[in-house]
Image (cartoon, rainbow, N blue to C red):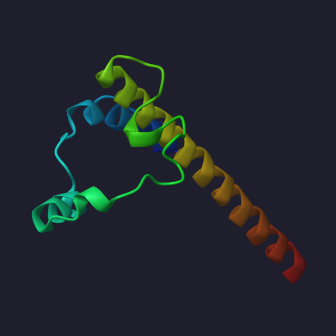
Amino acid sequence: MSTRRLVGLGLVVSLLVAGVLSVYASGRPDGLESVAGTLGFDGTATDSAAAGSPLADYAVHGIGDPRLSGGLAGIVGALVVGLAMTGLVLLVRRRAASRTDGDV
C-alpha cells in the first residue's frame, strides 16, 4: 500500500471516529470531575481561558443539535490535529533533506 493511500485511509478513519463515534461518547463526568464531586470540591472549579472558544465543551457553538454539534467538533478537531501533524512532518522532512544535502 502506498504512503498516500495509507495516509488517506487514516484520515478517513479518523474523521469517521471523530464525527460519528464521538456522538456516542459518555455524557457522564470524567474521572477528575467524578472525584471532585465525590470529595465535595466540584463547586470550586472555574472556567478555563478557552471556555468561550468556538469548540469549548466538545461542541460547536451556534448549532442547536447536540449530536451534530459534537460530531462537527470532533471532525474539526481531527482536521486541526491532522494539519498540525502534516506541517510537522513536512518540517522534519525538509530539515532531514537539508542535512543530507549538506553531508555530501
In the rendered image, residue 89, in percent from the top left (x then y), is placed at: 64, 58
**Is there any visible trace of residue 16 in the rendered image?**
yes
* Horizontal side of residue 89 vs 50, given as left or right: right
Tell which residue pokes out farthest to the bottom in this image: 103
Total marks drawn?
A: 0
Q: Nearer the viewer, residue 72 or 83?
A: 72
Q: Residue at x 77, y 63 (%)?
A: 94
Tell which residue pokes out farthest to the left in this image: 38
In the rendered image, residue 53, in percent from the top left (x then y), is placed at: 54, 40
Q: Which quarter of the image is occupied by the C terminus? A: bottom right
Q: Residue at x 70, y 56 (%)?
A: 90
**Compared with residue 43, is residue 6 higher up or lower down, i.e. above or below?**
above
Q: Nearer the viewer, residue 22 or 34?
A: 34
Tell which residue pokes out farthest to the top in this image: 64
Write down the quadrant of residue 39 in the picture: bottom left
Q: Which quarter of the image is occupied by the N terminus? A: top left
In the rendered image, residue 2, in percent from the top left (x then y), is placed at: 52, 44
* Horizontal side of residue 29 vs 66, given as left or right: left
* Horizontal side of residue 39 vs 94, given as left or right: left
**Is there any visible trace of residue 3 in the rendered image?**
no
Q: Nearer the viewer, residue 72 or 39?
A: 39
Q: Residue at x 78, y 69 (%)?
A: 95
Write down the quadrant of residue 65 in the picture: top left
In the rendered image, residue 43, in percent from the top left (x then y), is placed at: 26, 56
**Compared with residue 15, is residue 86 higher up or lower down, i.e. above or below?**
below
Write down the quadrant of residue 10 in the picture: top left
